Image: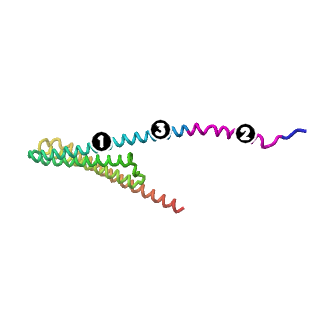
Amino acid sequence: MAQKRPSGSGGEMTSEKLSLKQNSNPPKYADAANSLSRAEVVFIRLAAVVYAAAALAMMAISVGLITVSLTRVYAAIINHERAEGALLEAVSSLVISVAILDVAKYVMEEEVLRSRELRNPTEAREAVTKFMVIIALVVAIEGIVLVFELGNSEPELLLYPILLLAMSVIIVIGLGVFQRLSLQAEKRLADAESAHEAR
C-alpha cells in the first residue's frame, strides 16, 4: 500500500527556500539605495553651491552696472557732454540690473534656499511675465537711445533702432498670447480639480 506524502510539505519547503533567498538579498539592495541617496545628497549640495555662486556673481554684476551708470551720468552732467544720452543709457543699465537682480533672487530662492517652489501655475506665470516685461523694457529703451544718438548724426541707420522697437512690440504681443493661454490652462486645471473634489 503506497504511503501518501503530506500535501503541504513540498509547498512549505519551497516557501522556506524563497523566504531565505529574499532575506539574503535586501542588505545588498539597502546598501545600494544608501549609496545612491548619499550620492544624490552630495550632488544636490554641490549644485546648491554652484547656484549660490552664480546668484552672488549676478548680484555683483548688477551692483557694478548701477555704479558704472551713475558714474557716467555724474561725469556727463559735470562735463556737459551728452547728458540726455547718458541719462537714457543709465535708465537702460538700471533696468538691466533690476532684471539681473530678479533672476539672481529667483535662483537663490528656488535652487539654494528652497523656501518655496513654483508649483502653482499662477506664480510661474507671474514670474515669467515679470521677467519678459523687463526684457521688453530694456529692448525698447535701447531702441530709443539709438534713435536719439543716430537721429542727428547718422539718420540712414535709423532702421536698426526701429527694428529694436518693433522687436519690443513683438515681445509684448507674445507675452499677451502667453498670458491668455496660461489663464485658459489655469481655468481648465481649476475646473478639473473642482470636479475631482466633487466626486
The residue segment tinted magenta is 5-30
Mark 1 — residue? Answer: 57
Mark 2 — residue? Answer: 14
- As for residue 29 lying within the magenta part, the answer is yes
Q: Residue 184 appears at what percent x and percent y? A: 41, 56
Q: Main secondary structure of the magenta part?
A: helix
Foreground label between 2 and 3: 3
The amino acid type of the residue labelled 3 equals Ala
Ranked by sequence position, the earlier of labels 2 and 3 is 2
| Horizontal side, residue 194 vs residue 96: left or right | right
Instruction: Give above or below for 131 relative to 193.
Output: above
* Residue name at image x 45 percent, y 59 percent: 190
| Horizontal side, residue 164 vs residue 176: left or right | left
Instruction: Describe the element under mark 2 as helix, strand or loop.
Output: helix
Q: Residue 139 appears at what percent x and percent y? A: 25, 47
Ranked by sequence position, the earlier of labels 1 and 2 is 2
Mark 3 — residue? Answer: 39
